[in-house]
Amino acid sequence: MNLKDRAFRFGPAIVLLAITATFIITATSYDPQTRAMPMAVGILTTILLVLELLAQRDDRLGALLRSVFVGRSGLPGADDAGPVSVRREIGAAFWIVAFLILSILFGFYIAIPVYVFCYLTLYARKSLIRAGIAAVGIISLLYLMFQVLLHYPIFGGILFGDFM
Amino acid sequence: MLDAIGLSLGGLFFSGGVLYIVMGTMVGLLFGIIPGLGGPTALALLIPLTFGIDTTSAMFLAGAIMGAVPFGGSVTAILLNTPGTAPNAATVFDGYPLAQQGKAGLALGAAGAASAIGGLLGVLVLFAVLPIARQMILMFSPPEFFMLAVLGLCAIAVSTEGKFLRGLIAAGIGLLIAYIGYDNVSGVVRFAYGTDYLWDGVPLVPALIGLFAIAQIFSLYVKGGSISENPAAVKVTRVMDGVKAVFTHYPTLLRGSVIGALVGAVPGVGGTVAAFLSYSTTVQLSKEPETFGKGNIQGVIAPEASNNAREGGALIPTLAFGIPGSAEMAVFLGLLVLHGIQPGPSVLLNHLDVVTTLMLSLAVASVLASVLCLLVARQLAAITLVDVNYLVPIILSVSLVGAYALNNSMYDVIIAVVFGLVGYLMIRFDFPRLPLVIALFLGEIVEVNFRQSLMISQGDWTIFFSRGLSLTLFALILVSLFLPFLRYVIRRARTQKESRS
């Protein structure tokens, strides 16, 4: 089993275990009534996560647990999720987060056309004219829908004095 | 009841209800046709847009979307061998072979008529069950509501085939997230970690926009290309022959509708199971089972009728107990919350007009979607040729602006993006999203009813087991939890028997 397979099989459960442990530790500081349900759910989730970790092991116990809970004893590998490129996933996350940061700083009216234009030209390799038309089209559509028809205020960006 | 129906009819004819139904039907068809989007994404994007309109109009819009999505998905299933939504996968088996034989119109006509009639029958089932459901609700008190909410979570986790353990883990994490913010009983702020924004808890609607719309965008980003590469140059003719075929094979239609409505009412089982169950039952009962998979029109009628009838059935647990039967229904509950309606028994007891409006819009949309879709089926199918790269920025922009518009808060937008990433990671690592979403809704119901029960009994735990209904629900929870073990024992016994023989 290589490192990629190991991360694929054990990674999610370990991260979730850490999150659950944080909840349980935090809950101990509350009074008994307030912490009862989060503690109970946290402890049950921890047990389930430990079972999940055991079920991912390549031994008899793991095979037995998989047979019971998954209905098959075989182990999935990292490549079983399909031909997904991690680089492409990081790229996708980058575009979404970049758009979010741009929106917070400059507001939607600037962020949307800039994002659409950059995404279509740099990532999707579309022509400048098509990207420009798409950028103007999308922001016009959103302006009509939200500002004109529904009278919603659109965020103007913290750099231009708007509040989060 | 009659007053509520009168109000709904008034809304339909005199307050622009027809317009909202037409709009919702168009949006539903569009989102049904584009594979990967579907009803939950359409509803998640719609929620912020309904903020400025009254509740009745919002129900017309939502009902129309829910009524139209199932048939939208069958258009591409028949014409392009690409089901628009998962439940339409069963339609592919016989729908696409018919299209290949030049009988696309026949298949579409049959699918349209079966969807419309199935949708109407599903609404009729809901209508028949409503008076009983209202009586049943009055039998429920905090211990029963607690048990029912836990049962809903367990049933949904069990129904995620092959992901039972991960379903329960997702439900557990969802419950923990639901406990962030004010404790509704004591007023203490929990798990906010010094962030004022989290005092009111994680907002549901931005989380839903993230988990469905943005997670789907993420998947489209990663996939790239266009949804369909090679659309057949289809001729949509003989549509009326398809419509007639539905009436010729009325037992198939009725059977499919009943299966759809019944399966839809079971939380978590979903439309895919209903459609495949309906299809397989039709094959088993047929005198010519060998003709299925090669273009038998009954193979189109059965899953389509069941697919639309399911919507009516799924509304029963959603409206009566606040336990969503599917992802679509979970998002729909978010819409109710936004309009100040607390999901659960109060909907049936105090907002019956909401229920009748939904029923009306589901029924009208089922018929309207079929008629509209049959008129422009070929043009609609061409949508799947659009490059995904154009869809991504449109849907992402609408999602983020929509998330902001709810409370004029960019923190909501951040929550939507965070849940979008979480949703994508759940798809990537094969964790079901539905139990998490449903736990976000049920977290408060579980905790409040648990603590109210203990207050009523003055701390006596036997209150959960000393009442007949509560005990029955507890037994059902145990059954649902032991189901995987039971399956394992049966599988093992069968394997041993086979190896011996």
Image (cartoon, coloured by chain):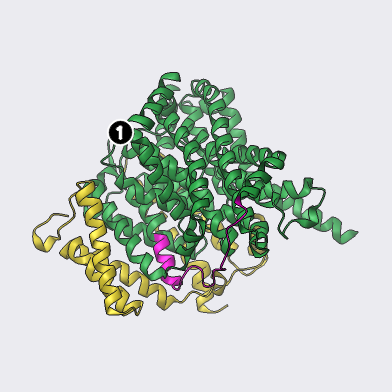
B466 is higher (above) or lower (below) than B324: above
Residue bearing mark 1: B186
Quarter location, residue B310: top right
Q: Is residue A57 magenta?
A: no
Which residue lies most toward the left here?
A: A161
Instruction: Identify which residue, B487 or A59, lies in the foreground.
Output: B487
B447 is higher (above) or lower (below) than B175: above
Q: Colour of chain B?
A: green
Residue pictured at 66% horizontal, 55% vertical: A68
- Tell me the quadrant of the picture where the N terminus of chain B can be found: top left
> Residue B195, can we see it?
no
Residue pictured at 44% horizontal, 59% vertical: A16
The chain whose colour is yellow is A
Residue pictured at 62% horizontal, 37% vertical: B262
Dot 1 falls on a residue whose secondary structure is loop
Magenta span: helix, strand or loop, mainly?
A: loop
Q: Left of A116 or right of it: where is B329?
A: right
Subunit under mark 1: B
Instruction: Identify which residue, B331 or A141, lies in the foreground.
Output: A141
Specify the segment rendered in magenta. B215-239
B255 is higher (above) or lower (below) than B287: above
Disc 1 residue crowd, few under 14, some 14–19, many 20+, Cα 10 Å: few
- Tell me the quadrant of the picture where the C terminus of chain B can be found: bottom right
> Residue B109, can we see it?
yes
Residue pictured at 43% horizontal, 22% vertical: B456
Q: Left of B442 or right of it: where is B166?
A: right
Counting from the top left corner in percent of width and height, residue A57 is at: 59, 67
Instruction: Identify which residue, B398 or A92, lies in the foreground.
Output: B398
